Amino acid sequence: MVINIFILLLLLALGVSADQDAFVGVNIGTAVSDMPNPTQVAVLLKSQQLRHVRLYDADQGMLLALSGTGIQVTVTVPNQQLLAIAQSNTTASNWVSRNILPHVGTTNITAISVGNEFLTTNPNAASVLVSALKYIHSALISAKLDSQIKVSTTHSSSIILDSFPPSQAFFNRTLEPVMISLLEFLQSTDSYLMLNVYPYSDYIQSNGAIPLDYALFRPLPPEMEAIDANTLLHYTNVFDAVVDAAYFAMLYLNYTNIPIVVTESGWPSKGDSSEPDATLDNANTYNSNLIKHVLNNTGTPKHPGVATSTYIYELYNEDLKPGSESEKNWGLFDSDGRPVYVLNLMDSGSVLANDTTDRTYCVAKKDADKKMLQAALDWACGPGKVNCSVMLQGEPCYQPDTVVAHATYAFDAYYHQMAMADGTCNFNGVATVTTTNPSRDGCTFPGSGGSNGTINNGTSLVPSSNSTTSGGFSKLDSVSFFRLFGAFLWTVAFL
Ligand SMILES: *[C@@H]1O[C@H](CO)[C@@H](O)[C@H](O)[C@H]1NC(C)=O
Ligand SMILES: *[C@@H]1O[C@H](CO)[C@@H](O)[C@H](O)[C@H]1NC(C)=O
Ligand SMILES: *[C@@H]1O[C@H](CO)[C@@H](O)[C@H](O)[C@H]1NC(C)=O
Ligand SMILES: *[C@@H]1O[C@H](CO)[C@@H](O)[C@H](O)[C@H]1NC(C)=O
Ligand SMILES: *[C@@H]1O[C@H](CO)[C@@H](O)[C@H](O)[C@H]1NC(C)=O
Ligand SMILES: *[C@@H]1O[C@H](CO)[C@@H](O)[C@H](O)[C@H]1NC(C)=O
Ligand SMILES: *[C@@H]1O[C@H](CO)[C@@H](O)[C@H](O)[C@H]1NC(C)=O
Ligand SMILES: *[C@@H]1O[C@H](CO)[C@@H](O)[C@H](O)[C@H]1NC(C)=O
Ligand SMILES: *[C@@H]1O[C@H](CO)[C@@H](O)[C@H](O)[C@H]1NC(C)=O
Ligand SMILES: *[C@@H]1O[C@H](CO)[C@@H](O)[C@H](O)[C@H]1NC(C)=O
């Protein structure tokens, strides 16, 4: 009993409470030329065990498709509707009646973001933001939905200035009056701060001052870890530093008990020639490490163990997004539901996982040396103990009678026989893991669950071969590092 009270006091002293497990959700942007219909989206979400989604509107078709799934949904009041809502409680209550009430009891809407990065996209109208939140909240009270649906609004992390070191961070002073009334509202309604966190942008804007590994959650040598000299907290990744900067910016205004939910975070998998860090490998590393970090309930250095639930940006690649190539390539999936890359999520629980672990295949590299392929094929069908009789003449996997086709079958059989363990799809470098089902007419590959490969439902979360490339980064340029991080407040030990 005494111990329990002690823990309770400890949690109270912490302010932000640690009573919930963190979740990983996903954003669903729809600027996709062949956007899957809502039913297809819901099927994908279910197959990936995704239990939390955020929409950029309150699309009725999507909300209907999510009914009965138990998936928790954050909907958005689009910015262009916000002004009208901020000016009239009737407009606000009509919005709630039209968009929310029809789904009560069937679709689990748990939050409304009133606007999306409104303060940065509409700075001149900043002062009306909180009225809009209050009117929407009043309408929810009238409908007795205020306890199950939280009201908040998403922010770009660019409203937080001097984020490095985190303890020095504060909200842009121009926005301070708005932030104070917003935080007052969030606190009094038991809501949370919604923050979009993009270590990719911080890394790009730092011009090399931030090491790539620090942005990607890769281990840094201890002497490279950033230490906040005011708090002596050690930061091992940019994500935590940005989240803590937001906690400190709130603390600066004397708000200590408002939790943070990260409404967007991700990494682009492809970019144009000026975006060399937008790669499949980096996107995979970032999102895989982010998911592991969040689900481990690691919290941040300032609030260890406190959930930082996070929505990944984003479910689909949005090919219709304007801007550079990277803007179109933040997705985990193509519009046909094919994973863009194979997340590396071993041992991280169930999200984006189970259904999918049997959906990778091991295939022969097309350009591999034929002699090495033949040797690997012989090994697989011999010492490797793969039953290769299905490739004999007259059997279903005989055609096409090429070494690449036969090696692919044998490699895949071996890989699945070995439960897709790390390193079992290598064969001296002539094999590679893929998410595309190589099955063909009559010849069903191991791991395909009997399907013939035209649609691939799942992403497989098996390590993508030897993916931990840790190309060492060069020593920091101390001048630019200090310019960015604030020389005398934020120290890094150099060896
Ligand atoms: C909706 O989500 C909330 C929050 O986790 C949960 O407590 C509630 O049981 C869910 N309701 C339904 C109908 O699934
Ligand atoms: C809207 O505001 C007016 C006064 O400002 C108030 O009388 C009325 O009850 C409010 N309506 C709703 C639906 O909250
Ligand atoms: C602070 O916000 C104002 C208004 O949105 C903007 O004009 C200004 O550039 C911001 N300051 C910084 C340093 O970002
Ligand atoms: C925060 O609290 C301190 C101590 O109570 C006070 O001095 C300071 O003015 C407060 N800051 C704001 C922004 O209210
Ligand atoms: C998970 O959390 C524990 C402590 O709670 C920590 O020791 C461990 O390093 C964390 N693992 C990851 C992958 O973050
Ligand atoms: C996923 O798989 C793990 C281990 O196989 C299991 O413990 C967990 O319950 C599964 N999760 C779901 C949602 O099926
Ligand atoms: C190999 O598979 C065939 C069917 O494809 C089966 O008849 C045969 O018994 C298997 N051989 C061994 C050794 O399991
Ligand atoms: C994978 O790693 C193993 C040892 O860990 C190494 O022998 C093998 O060559 C690597 N394969 C590739 C494709 O890099
Ligand atoms: C693939 O499977 C689907 C349904 O399972 C079937 O309609 C289709 O004909 C199959 N295609 C081939 C090439 O076997
Ligand atoms: C895809 O997954 C859905 C739901 O899990 C299932 O109904 C469907 O049969 C799967 N399709 C294929 C081709 O595996």
Image (cartoon, rainbow, N blue to C red):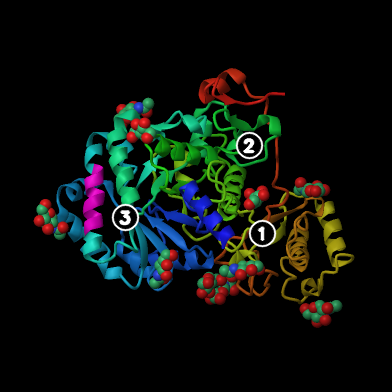
On residue 347, the disc is 1
Q: Would you say 474 lies left or right of 27 here?
A: right
Mark 1, residues whose alpha carbon is within 10 Å: few (<14), some, or many (≥20)? Answer: few
Depth check: 7 or 354 in front? 7
Q: Which residue is mark 3?
A: 57
| Rendering coords of residue 284 (x, y %) | 60, 48
Which quarter of the image is occupied by the N terminus?
A: bottom right
Q: Earlier in the sequence, mark 1 or mark 3?
A: 3
Residue 122, above or below 406:
above
* Stretch in magenta: 129-138
Rendered residue at 55%/48% (across/down): 299
Q: Quadrant of ligand 9?
A: bottom right
Residue type at mark 3? Answer: Asp
Task: Residue 173: name its quadrant.
Answer: top left
Q: Which residue is mark 2?
A: 213
Cα distance in 3D space between marks 3 and 2: 35 Å
